[in-house]
Image (cartoon, grey):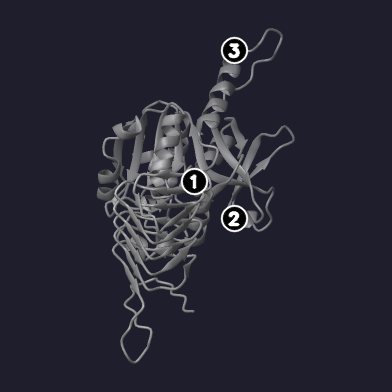
Amino acid sequence: MKGLILSGGAGTRLRPITHTSAKQLVPIANRPILFYGIDDMAAAGITEVGIVISPATGHEIRDAVGDGSTFGVSVTYITQDEPLGLAHCVQIAHDFLGDDDFVMYLGDNMLEQGLAGFVAQFEDTRTAANTPQLGEAPTVSPAAQILLAEVDDPTSFGVAELNEADQVIRLVEKPSNPPSNLALVGVYLFDKTIHEAVAAIEPSPRGELEITDAIQRLIDDGHTVVHDVLSGWWIDTGKKDPLLECNRLVLDSLEQRIDGAVDADSIVEGRVVVEGGATVINSTIRGPAVIGAGSVIDHSHIGPYSSVGIDCRITRSEIDNSVVLRRSVITDIPRLTDSLIGRDTEVERDQRRPRATRLMIGDHCHIGIE
């Protein structure tokens, strides 16, 4: 079985961060989102992984992931010149995938449960179909398996309709009258039949080849599509607030580890990671929190659910529930919360007269003033 991780896309909902960086490389607990997906593939026993990249940000992803050996996998990069849909990603990856079964995973998704159980369920179902027990009628081997999650507002998602036998019979995209509360999560498992289905569909009104249309084509052609219902949390990290929520959930699993330097005047409480090369001076850090390698926390308070990237400097400031990306500087800020701070950013209290708020910000920013 192979893996296909989709890491193209412009990341418009995370601008301005994604004007200069791939959204899949925004860190959760100081680790790029994409890395968690590759880890999940490896944990499920998948060693050949294709990553679909865009011309704009593909070089960043190549630099970050390399050949995949760090994760215990072999990576093949597949460039999608234009964002023409998820099914188009399957189409352009056909040479890499061949006739093998494969898991397709959206690179900005985070799942608590991982992929191992999802893959095992598909393989067990196929094994049972191919080796019926004595006296039992043979079953049809599934062509696809989809992961579903119960959601409060199904009108915002692709939704699966199930029959009385709990089989998937229809997929509906953002229905005004949902047939269920089971939304497509963005993790799919296919056999080679999906390539025929993708070749048979037409672009949607938005000009994309939709994976939901391809799966529906499988169903219409008489193939079996099975499903699994998600256990644990699932977050699409494409917006700031869900990204911060995901950061909180991952930080909750930390175990304290102090590899950097913490002076005698500092207090470190709870699940805190201070990476090697980081320095904490006369400061308080209350976990869960992580301080990146090379960062300096000086006369400051780092509150719960904060991730400070590498080579940052935070001086005479207080932050909590925030993600600070690498090489950023925060100085004399009395309270910073619920924030996502981009790379190489400076946030400081201006001491000039007259006292005023002075900003230099890019496109698609949101600034909350006290």
Per the model, the C-alpha gap separating discs 1 and 3 is: 34 Å
Which of the pair 284/273 is nearer the observer?
A: 284
Mark seen at residue 110: 1
Q: Position of residue 197 (x, y in %)?
A: 47, 36
Of the residues shown, which amino acid type is indicated by label 1? Answer: Met
Q: Position of residue 150 (x, y in %)?
A: 65, 47
Outermost residue, bottom direction?
A: 354
Q: Residues within 10 Å of mark 1 (few under 14, many from 20)?
A: many
Instruction: Give the mark, 1 or 2, whose residue is nearer the N terminus.
Output: 1
Q: Quadrant of residue 105?
A: top left
Question: Height in image: 189 above or below 57?
Answer: above
Q: Quadrant of residue 263?
A: bottom left
The residue drawn where x is 32% and y is 52% is 278
Label 2: which residue? 174
Instruction: Give the mark, 1 or 3, whose residue is nearer the N terminus.
Output: 1
Secondary structure, mark 1, is strand
Would residue 210 be visible to someone looking at this image? no
Of the residues shown, which amino acid type is indicated by label 2? Answer: Lys
Would residue 218 be visible to someone looking at this image? yes
The residue drawn where x is 30% and y is 41% is 65
Of the residues shown, which amino acid type is indicated by label 3? Answer: Thr
Secondary structure, mark 2, is loop
Label 3: which residue? 131
